[in-house]
Amino acid sequence: MTLSMKDEILKRFLSANGEPISGQRLADDLGISRTAIWKHLQTLQEEGYTFETIKKKGYVLMTKPDKVEAPRVTAFLKTERFGQTIHYLEECTSTQTIAYELARNGAKDGTLVIAETQTMGKGRMSRPWESTKGKGIWMTIIIRPDILPHQAPQFTLVAAVSIVNAMKSLCHQFSPYIKWPNDILINGRKCTGILTEMIAEMDRVQCLLIGMGINVNQELSDFPEELHPIATSLRIEEKKPLNRAELVGTILNYLEKYCDLYVKDGFAPIKLLWEEASGTIGKRIRATTLTEVIEGKAIGITESGVLEIQLDNGEIKNVYSADIEL
Ligand code: BTN
């Protein structure tokens, strides 16, 4: 686990559960001066944490802002690799861009980049992505599976299954489902988008950058008007705010488990999990591709994550990329 000194101090206060920690003890444990401890506490106060000083006992953490910093996320991790290095940013252009630079410079498998807000969030097909400050999960995980370039899209499906299962384990008022290929919807409205990019040579994937944008604690008024009919958040559907750090940790736990399952047993078990979490399979749909509109019943996905649609005349068509209407 790579934590900065400030995050190490914060981690100790978060796990002290309101008990005082002495400045001298912190300084001794961490091998730094009491002045350095005090400076880190000042920085944490500037970030919205408040501490009370109790005579002869030390400092008590009184209030904490709702943030997705490393120590908050690591408290929920049960992974060996995923999230063991976290780059947390208050603001960035796009976590994909930051992750790309880190990956080029050798970032390890499972490195996470997460931000409170993005000024140039990217959606699929070069669409902009709205990233309301402090309300959602805007993150990119760098993974380095030993795969060929044509297998990369399957990892988007691995990510979708991980997110749905994490949501199901923390939320109980609704049932999220995947709309092929990689949107997660609740009651017909989108709450999550996934963007997978890769750095690869012709015959070898160096790494995948799996970007996830999850609407967590927005209220309807946080969304621009034009998104009201099509977007939602977990808070709106669950009718209460959620702990974003817990959701991040839970997603990473599932993601590491399913990526390892994929590497061990191939796509078959993931395909089953995906079909179980899918709201598309078995439904009558309209798929608009670049060249045609196909109407029929979605009957499954292939090994490469391609959607199979059965037309009314029985013919089966494979769809590689399309906008889907249910
Ligand atoms: C989509 O179009 O549905 C995909 C949206 C993906 C958005 C996420 S937010 C975190 C990461 N950084 C980005 O700039 N995009 C992805």
Image (cartoon, rainbow, N blue to C red):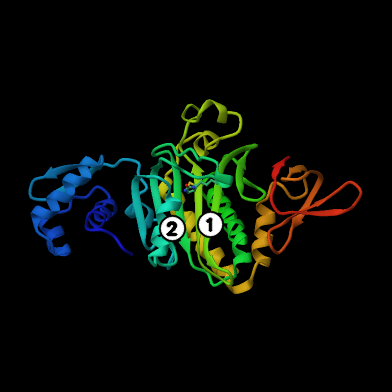
SS at mark 2 in the image: helix
In contact (CB < 8 Å): disc 1 and disc 2: yes
Residue 122 versus residue 276: which sits nearer the camera?
122
**The residue carrying mark 2 has its beta carbon less than 8 Å from ligand 1:** no
SS at mark 1 in the image: strand
Q: Quadrant of residue 34?
A: bottom left
Name the residue beneath numbered marker 2. Answer: 100
**Residue 229 in view, yes or no:** yes
Residue 45: % across, % down? 20, 42
In the image, residue 301 sits, relative to residue 44, either above or below, namely below
At 76% from the left edge and 45% from the top edge, which residue is drawn? 291
Residue 245 versus residue 146: which sits nearer the camera?
146
Crowding near the residue tagged with mark 2, few <14, some 14–19, many ≥20 C-alpha atoms within 10 Å: many
Q: In the picture, which quadrant includes the C terminus?
A: top right
Query: In the image, 224: left or right of 148?
Result: left
In the image, residue 213 sits, relative to residue 263, either above or below, namely above
Question: Earlier along the polypeptide chain: callout 1 or callout 2?
Answer: 2
In the image, residue 25 sits, relative to residue 291, either above or below, namely below
Residue 291 versus residue 234: which sits nearer the camera?
291
- On residue 197, the disc is 1
Crowding near the residue tagged with mark 1, few <14, some 14–19, many ≥20 C-alpha atoms within 10 Å: some
